[in-house]
Amino acid sequence: MPIKIGLIGKTNTGKTTFFNAATLAGGEISSYPFTTKKPQRATGNAITPCVHTELNVKDDPKNSKCVDGWRLIPVELIDLPGLIKDAWAGKGLGNQFLSIATQSDALLHVVDVSASVDAAGRITDVGKGDPIADVSDIEEELIMWYLKLLEGNRDKISKLVHAETEQLIAITDVFRGIGVKESHVKEALKVTGLENKHFDNFDMHDSKKFAVYLRRISKPTLIVANKIDLPGADKNFDRLREKYVDTIIVPASADSELSLRRAEQKGLIKYVPGSEQFEILQKDKLNKKQLEALDFITKGILGEYMRTGVQFAINVTVFKLLKMNSIYPVANPEKLSDRKGRVLPDLILMKDGSTVEDLAKEIHSDLTKGLLYAKDVRYGVRLPVNYQLRDRDIVSLVSAKTKKS
Ligand SMILES: Nc1nc2c(ncn2[C@@H]2O[C@H](COP(=O)(O)OP(=O)(O)OP(=O)(O)O)[C@@H](O)[C@H]2O)c(=O)[nH]1
Ligand SMILES: [Mg+2]
């Protein structure tokens, strides 16, 4: 299953623009508040340098793509309607999509860092809005959603605990639907010092504290400081960074990325998403306005920030926030191929700390039976089943069965 990344934020911040730029989907973009009415999903990519260049082989990918030495790994993006205050209580489209948002593995919180969206969500003059308040408003909605799940299920949890169900399991149960794991609940109980307190004795203060931490632990979030192309946005970006010191914040111009991706799609330019440059291929087909826009992107965005931030935000989410490593399993270590001779066919994302055994499980549950070790293709050594895989490892799993054949 691909990694799921949900796009949340206030209305008009550029979520759909980001979504379209990353996936080339055709979601409706407009300057009216609440344009997106229903969650929509499409496939984008996380991008990482492919190992084939280092090994000097020609690859033939199956579960991913390889473009100019970059591996494109599919990830699912979910574009969501804009959140408003009290969405958790059912306001706006509230409930329905908060639940979809929280089913993601990670969230991208898109903020209009140019401050051109007012409190009601309308586009206004640049600088009139307050991106710092926007971030905390949306954050509060998510926390309230977690709190509601806990408090709204008080009787259920209490009954389970009285029926001798471990408290940790009983609480995890009500959050399972939004991808919260037992380990998340365990950690949240620990950091809030509620480990040994009976659930019946949780007061409102305890519950809120627990909700704050569970939200933080279970749903890693990156802030996308969008519309960095507009005047004054850089100052707000600095303010945002000062305020949210423990959050990764990526400056972005989703609008610029969308222009580049569309131009690339039409063959007008050559551009690899996330890269620091593009090349104009058909200058004669571009009008003056388009050329000026591309010139602005070169100087104002790529020159200042090195990238538009869209692809970068996805990469950082997958590789830093979610701590995924790229693992290349191969059946034939000499040819670096699968049984059919496809060279470096798959790239599997495995969370940091995953072992050889976890990889076997991920590929096929049958593979763990009789698993002996993995062969490290680069160094030719045997890696024990409990070896923790490293980023860019190329491994060949050896089981009792494969050994015989
Ligand atoms: N200058 C600038 N404008 C942008 C950028 N990204 C989006 N916009 C504009 O912001 C407005 C809102 O964009 P959308 O992508 O529809 O925003 P949204 O967050 O999906 O809005 P809702 O669906 O209503 O929640 C549109 O006019 C976009 O063209 C950007 O990077 N820079
Ligand atoms: Mg939208």
Image (tube, rainbow, N blue to C red):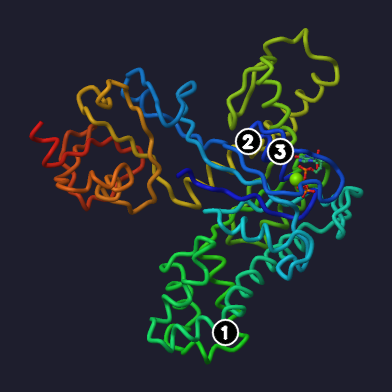
Task: Tell me: residue 178, above or below residue 27.
Answer: below
Ligand 1 is within 8 Å of the C-beta of the residue at disc 3: yes
Q: Residue 399 vs residue 78: left or right?
A: left
Return the disc, 1 or 3, that comes first in the chain's sequence: 1
Tell me where residue 68 appears, x and y as whole percent. Answer: 48, 21
Give the residue type that dot 2 points to.
Ala
Q: Dividing the image into four quarters, tell me where ligand 2 lies.
A: top right
Classify mark 2: helix, strand or loop. Answer: helix
Relative to 334, does residue 361 appear above or below in the rendering? below
Q: Which mark is residue 22?
A: 2
Circle on res. 206:
1
Distance CA(mark 1)–CA(mark 3): 39 Å
Label 2, label 1: how far apart the Cα atoms are: 40 Å
Where residue 379 sits, quadrant-wise, is: top left
- The picture places residue 270, in percent across and down from the top left corner, at 62, 18
Q: Secondary structure at mark 1?
A: helix
The quadrant of the image that shows the C terminus is top left
